[in-house]
Amino acid sequence: MGSRASTLLREEEIEEIKKETGFSHSQITRLYSRFTSLDKGENGTLSREDFQRIPELAINPLGDRIINAFFPEGLDREDQVNFRGFMRTLAHFRPIEDNEKNKDPTASEPLNSRTNKLLFAFRLYDLDRDDKISRDELLQVLRMMVGVNISDEQLGSIADRTIQEADQNGDNSISFNEFIKVLEKVDVEQKMSIRFLH
Amino acid sequence: MVLFLDFNPFDNLLCILLGISFTVWFTLLLVFIIVPAIFGVSFGIRQLYMKTLLKIFEWATRRIERGAKDKNHPLHKPYSNAIIAKEPTSLEEEIKEIRRSGSNRDLDSASEFEMSDIFYFCRRGVESIMDDEVTKRFSAEELESWNLLTRSNYNFQHISLRLTVLWGLGVVIRYGFLLPLRVTLAFTGVGLLVVLTSIIGFLPNGRTKNFLSEKVHLMCYRICVRALTAIITYHDSENKPKNGGICVANHTSPIDVIILASDGCYAMVGQIHGGLMGVIQKSMVKACPHIWFERSEVKDRHLVAKRLSDHVEDKTKLPILIFPEGTCINNTSVMMFKKGSFEIGSTVYPVAIKYDPRFGDAFWNSSQFGMVSYLLRMMSSWAIVCSVWYLPPMSREEGEDAVQFANRVKAAIARQGGLVDLLWDGGLKRGKVKDTFKEEQQKLYSKMLVGTQEDRSRS
């Protein structure tokens, strides 16, 4: 049973993660179990290969982009993510509780706010992190999602139409604010949230 | 002279004592373990042992919970149960729902692509990162209660003094008494198997040879069962596999073979190994026909299928024992059955094996432990407790292909053993998942985009 944690999570760390992400104590310990079972190298960090070993993620058309979200520092192959980083990214998918909706505006925005959820999705498109989704970037994501089943021309026209509808300042790309505007009616809170059983 | 006289009697006494204890030891061994194994009877010692152990484990778990509550620390929870709620909606349904909620245009001109479509893939992806159905099947199941083995304890900071003493006692008993006993038995069992089957090999083929071979095989496997202190409950023995059939079972460890073969005679299928395994295999095949393949022959599927069907057609030969998963799974689920054995067209006798993990985890994680360290772990656990169900025989029905038949058998085994029925391939333990699954999803999504265009061009 060697995939047991070689160092158990300290109470102080759990408290810090709780404050930063909003997960409960038991959710954090369960996710820590999950983290250590994915960590085949047993060095306290996960690499891209560790994620790619999950079959359900490997068959997800956007699997690679989702894995990218855990490694914010460029596309270096040597990247590793520790448990804090792991939790910070997962925190985006925590459901928004009612008592959080009317928090005081001076507190920093929680990781699972509507805006941050939309930012997570935006970053899946915006590969070069220039805060704009260009036509190429949109095409890349579309190609990942449809595979070989749609021709280049058709895909191109879909991309053009999408940019045309969303673009407001005429720079032929979609900025984050334009992105938010297009999706303002979508139930982001529900669709980008994962409910825990405990 | 006087000094020497003082030493001699003492030495003699020591020798005599040692001699007596060895004799007593071996007599006890013979009477209580080997002789019952030969005749297939049981004194019920193991049942009693099991009940006592269970009571101790419950006590130990209560103490840990009390210890944890006193210090106000929550206990480490096993992750093998589901962490998150997963909705079983399909790709199409879910994306339509997302689009409907965000749509600010009339529903007649259904849009072909929305930027919110990626939410579906996003969420499914992160769900699988938090909890997926496959990777947890390849590591040992985590227990809710503690069974006094260090290897399965995650809350060791909560152990009180009394519990530590009990654990220490457990270590002494397991490594000092049980392990040597079991190793002796194992050597006896294997040794007898090799020697006796080689002797039987000299007999001419016929009824006597088959009869003797059956008795010898059963006896040696029963000794091996006692070497692991395996406490097995067989259910529905009227469905036991008959000659000319194929017995399929779910695979958790190499011990599965010993468990099934100690209750019935089977023809084994497998690759010839070198070393001790090879010696055992070669001598077994002298007494009755098993199907061993050279390494090179294993890849040739037609050859394998031919040898299996030839064996099955000869009604004097024993039923074949096959594990269609092809690899060891941790006994919480049943994974994809390889269709080879289901193409042959004979009656299939499904068998479900479920281990009770409280006494010792039987799963062989071959990437973590080699065979020898695995066997040592097995022999130093408390016991191996399992249930075997013989399911009614099944045959391929009209219009059913091998894959559908395999899935039907798999579902029956999973249902009986209380295991999760998965479509995933056990080969994912080592290999990558096939791209065809991703391509399926891409095709589904493309249909959503392109399908609407066709409707549009039609209107």
Image (cartoon, rainbow, N blue to C red):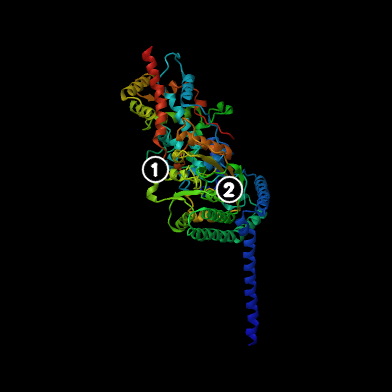
Position of B48 with respect to B366 (left or right) is right
Q: Position of residue A192 (x, y in %)?
A: 49, 28
Dot 1: within a 10 Å radius of its alpha carbon, few (fewer than 14), some, or many (20 or more) residues?
Answer: few
Circle 2 marks a residue in which chain? B
> Can residue A92 be seen from the camera position used here?
yes
Q: Is residue B11 left or right of residue A162?
A: right
Q: Is residue A166 visible?
A: no
Count every numbered label the image shows and give the total: 2
Q: Is residue B36 left or right of residue B108?
A: right
Badges 1 and 2, same chain: yes
- A28 in relation to B224, above or below: above
* Dot 2: element: loop
Q: Nearer the viewer, residue B182 or B294?
A: B294
The local secondary structure at tag 1 comes to helix
Nearer to us in this view, B333 or B71: B333
Say few, some or many: other residues with alpha carbon within 10 Å of mark 2 (under 14 / 14 to 19 / 20 or more).
some
Q: B258 and B72: which one is in front?
A: B258
Say which quadrant the C terminus of chain A sits in: top right
Quarter of the view holding residue B110: top left
Q: Amino acid at mark 1?
A: Arg
Mark 1 to mark 2 CA distance (whole Å): 45 Å
Residue lying farthest to the bottom in this orientation: B1
Q: Which residue is mark 2?
A: B154
Q: Which mark is residue B395?
A: none
Q: Mark 1 or mark 2: which comes first in sequence?
A: 2
Going by the numbered disc 2, the residue's amino acid type is: Tyr
Q: Identify residue for label 1.
A: B301
Give B91 or B394, whichever is nearer the viewer.
B394
Residue A112 on image: x %, y %: 51, 31
- Give percent across and percent down for residue B67: 66, 48
- Residue B301 vs B442, above or below: the answer is below
Chain under label 1?
A: B
